[in-house]
Amino acid sequence: MGESTTERSKNGDSTWRLSRRGLFGSALAAAGAATAGAAAGRMIDGESTADSGIEAFHGPRQAGIATPAQSHALFLSCDIARPDRAALRDLLAGWTATAAALAAGDPAPEKDDTPAGFSAHTDFATGLDPARLTVTFGLGPSVFDGRFGLADRRPEHLHPLPEFAGDVLNPAWSGGDVLVQICADDMQIVSHTFRALRARMPGLARMRWTQHGFLSRPGGGTPRNMFGHKDGTANPHPGTPEFDRAVWVASPDEPDWFHGGTYLVFRKIRMKTAEWDQLPIAEQNRIIGRRRDDGAPLGGHTEFDPIDVSARSANGDLEVPADAHVRLVHGIPMLRRGYNYDYGILLANASESTHPHEHPAGTDPNHTHGGHNQLDAGLLFAAYMNNPPDQFIRAQHALAATDRLNGLIQHTGSGIFAIPPGADPGEPVAVALGA
Ligand code: HEM
């Protein structure tokens, strides 16, 4: 595709925005090119949906990591159906081809054994822009447990996470052989992509869990979490040496096939929003160590001011309390690319034992709760890093011990995955693993 038909997105990442000029100009003339197919797919009644977003699927890194966070995400974890490397290989090959096509705005490829009269193209997303769709694949520790003859290729740090104080993990929301992170700015695109990937699973893999998340960026800035605080302020910026040092695997201790990849730590964290909303804002700010309204560190003025951990107020107290969330993990680098979730009242999970809470003195213990003890809302914490023991595990041990947030959150799901480097056109993801 020529430079004249496209514009690099302003944030300088791998997004290509097809301009209307491009849609009606040489891109369409290049019949057969994936991007032209994408452009045609976005025509509605002869008009383009304009300013379309395509994230490049292929490249040295998988998309969906350095990509600016889209507004919807679905995480899917599954187990390979049988101890057979061919099942893993076929799943990754089918999924890679499907993801590459959908990310380019093309229909999902037909399976070889699709009976006549059936189609993998469901029309469920026809006419929609790919909405910056990214599909990111990961492999859990169990892939290297010997079932597939890959034990000698295990990434250095790909081991189940240790137990942390306060964990209330539900096995039904944890672990898995293969993880897929699907992100896009349109939930229908996310759902359609999930459906197309799921259609590739029969005979190869069994679904283990899915989680759906969302986020919005006020004015294009840092998104807010379910407690109303800006979340992601201290993240390293893609393209900087700081980002590369924290995220991409380059250590000689790691197997060659994994170089250029990264690790994903996933935690489903329930946030007790009803209890939080009853705290004064000044206390909420002390719990986090930053101001809720503008994200500035306590003692600072604006969101991106450095955190001064030794700053004291006029009465001699630490501005950022000793047990404030940001103090405990300050300077531990990782890319936090999480999503909010809100499942409302999830009956399957509505027991006191999974959401213990206290009532203020004098409250009737049998009060109706307004349903708050059954709410399942919070954070799908998803962090990318190249050294989990020195990053997530160190940080989570510190938080689990003393974080002022602990009474207001609960870790209920968990997983760690090796995210292989990106795929070249025509190749499945993780081809260098030799699965
Ligand atoms: C529901 C749970 C959590 C909430 C509500 C939360 C919220 C926040 C907020 C509001 C900030 C400040 C803004 C920012 O820099 O992004 C922050 C920073 C941070 N959080 Fe969390 N967080 C949670 C869980 C975690 C977990 C589980 C970890 C890792 C184990 C973690 C690691 C970090 C780190 C490394 C920073 C940046 C600290 C710095 O260098 O200043 N957070 N978090």
Image (cartoon, helix red, strand yellow):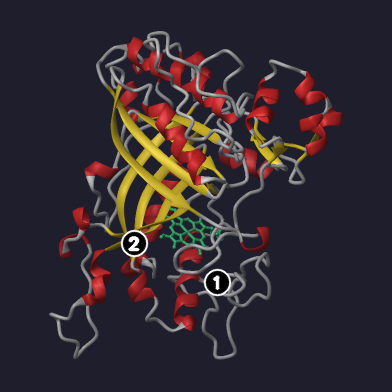
Q: Residue furthest right?
A: 4
Instruction: Give the label on residue 332, or none.
Output: none
Q: Is residue 334 visible?
A: yes
Label 2 within 8 A of ligand 1 by Cβ: no
Q: Please, what secondary structure does the residue beneath circle 2 have?
A: helix
> What x and y, as percent, mark residue 216?
56, 58
Q: Please, what secondary structure does the residue beneath circle 1 have?
A: loop
Q: Residue at x 78, y 38 (%)?
A: 19
Disc 2 and disc 1: Cα gap in Å? 20 Å
Give the class, few, some or many, for how many residues have Cα within 10 Å of label 1's Cα (few <14, many ≥20).
many
Comparing marks 2 and 1, which lies closer to the viewer?
1
Give the camera-side residue of 257 and 8: 8
- Where is mark 1, residue-wise? 290
Q: Quadrant of residue 43?
A: top right
> What x and y, as percent, mark residue 355?
23, 64
Q: Residue at x 28, y 17 (%)?
A: 203
Image quadrant where one finds the N terminus = top right
Give the class, few, some or many, for how many residues have Cα within 10 Å of label 2's Cα (few <14, many ≥20).
some
Task: Say what amino acid the circle numbered 2 marks.
Answer: Ala
Q: Residue at x 26, y 20 (%)?
A: 81
Task: Say what amino acid the circle numbered 1 marks.
Answer: Arg
> What x and y, as percent, mark residue 132?
61, 39
Image side of residue 46 versus residue 126, left or right: right
- Residues marked 2 and 1 touching at CB (< 8 Å): no
Between disc 2 and disc 1, whose residue precedes?
A: 1
Query: Relative to 223, does residue 280 appear above or below in the rendering?
Result: below
Q: Is residue 421 visible?
A: no
Instruction: Give the label on residue 401, or none.
Output: 2
Image quadrant where one finds the C terminus = top left
Label 1 within 8 A of ligand 1 by Cβ: yes
